[in-house]
């Protein structure tokens, strides 16, 4: 929390400048392409990363598919996770967020600019509709980042919680490639009351093509992705 407050204080003037700018980009798609919006998002995220005194190492970038829409499915540890993952992902990528969190200040402008999706946990009908929309967009070539664990609670290590399988029904519907993403030590950025420099890792694991999981149920796919992420954490955690 200390580092989060520090970032807000140190970047208060940047916030006053970039929040309206992101909102303007979101409202004028006729002026700003998806690539323009993503470049601005990465600029903002990198400023936050540097102010938070955090360095992120990236592994497996070569595993990211060059063509077609794909689903990035990552473990979840803190507020830094999406920022850490997307800074290493050069192609435009959107996000799926909890509706309540996504409508908070700054998060709202960020999600709107990336044309992200909001999931209303109180409405199963809305959730199904949103996942169907995402499946259609994945099939059309867009990329999405999701966190199957849902929330991250008060994590203080790289352990994994249960992976919810709803988002993998979307992957089945879209027949898209799934890229498991392992994040390591990202919890240290905003969950430790210290301003010491932090090193985190992001591992883009070997993609899982549709042909590999087409005969599995969504719950089995969730376990497959979780196991891939667990193996990547074990392999890279102590390096």
Image: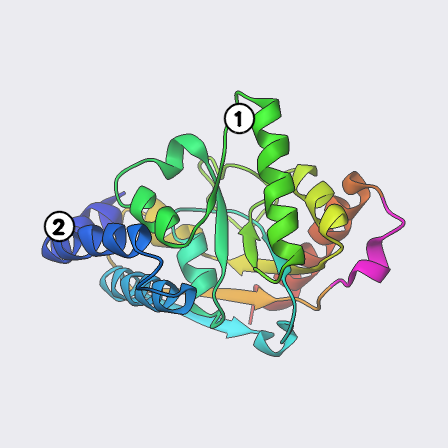
**Which quadrant holds the N terminus?**
top left
On residue 121, the disc is 1
**Residue 197 x/y as whole percent:** 30, 64
User: How has the structure been colored for display?
Assistant: rainbow
**Residue 36 x/y as whole percent:** 35, 68
Q: Nearer the viewer, residue 42 or 205?
A: 42
Q: Secondary structure at mark 2?
A: helix
Q: Secondary structure at mark 1?
A: loop
Left or right of 72? Residue 184 is left
Residue depicted at 33% across the width and 49% down the height:
190
Q: Residues within 10 Å of mark 1 (few under 14, many from 20)?
A: few
Is 106 drawn above or below residue 86 in the view shown? Answer: above
The magenta-colored residue range is 208-216
Query: Does 78 appear in magenta?
Result: no
Tell me the quarter of the picture where residue 166 sits. top right
Residue depicted at 61% across the width and 24% down the height:
125
Residue at the outermost top position: 122
**Residue 92 x/y as whole percent:** 47, 65
Q: Nearer the viewer, residue 236 or 204?
A: 204
Residue 80 appears in view: yes
Residue 164 appears in view: no
Residue depicted at 53% across the width and 58% down the height:
183
Q: Nearer the viewer, mark 2 or mark 1?
A: 1
**Which quadrant holds the C terminus?**
bottom right
Q: What residue did someone put label 2 on?
A: 9
Is 104 drawn above or below residue 92 in the view shown? Answer: above
On residue 84, the disc is none
Left or right of 29? Residue 201 is right
Q: Nearer the viewer, residue 1 or 68?
A: 68
Q: Residues within 10 Å of mark 2 (few under 14, many from 20)?
A: few
């Amino acid at each position: 929390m200390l580092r989060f407050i520090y970032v807000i204080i140190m970047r208060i003037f940047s916030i006053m400048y970039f929040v309206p700018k992101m909102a303007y980009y979101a409202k004028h798609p006729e002026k700003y392409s998806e690539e323009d919006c993503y470049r601005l998002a990465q600029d903002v995220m990198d400023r936050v990363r540097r102010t938070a005194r955090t360095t992120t190492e990236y592994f497996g970038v070569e595993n990211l598919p060059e063509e077609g829409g794909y689903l990035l499915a990552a473990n979840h540890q803190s507020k830094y996770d999406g920022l850490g993952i997307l800074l290493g992902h050069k192609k435009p990528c959107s996000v799926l967020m909890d509706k309540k969190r996504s409508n908070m200040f700054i998060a709202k402008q960020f999600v709107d600019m990336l044309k992200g999706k909001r999931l209303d946990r109180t409405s199963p009908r809305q959730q199904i509709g949103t996942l169907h929309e995402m499946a259609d967009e994945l099939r059309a070539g867009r990329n999405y980042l999701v966190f199957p664990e849902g929330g991250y609670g008060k994590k203080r290590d790289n352990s994994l919680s249960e992976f919810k399988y709803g988002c993998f029904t979307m992957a089945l519907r879209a027949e898209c490639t799934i890229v498991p993403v392992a994040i390591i030590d990202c919890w240290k950025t905003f969950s430790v009351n210290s301003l010491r420099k932090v090193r985190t890792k992001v591992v883009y694991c070997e993609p899982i093509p549709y042909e590999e999981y087409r005969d599995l149920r969504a719950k089995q796919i969730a376990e497959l992705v979780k196991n891939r992420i667990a193996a990547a954490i074990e392999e890279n955690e102590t390096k």
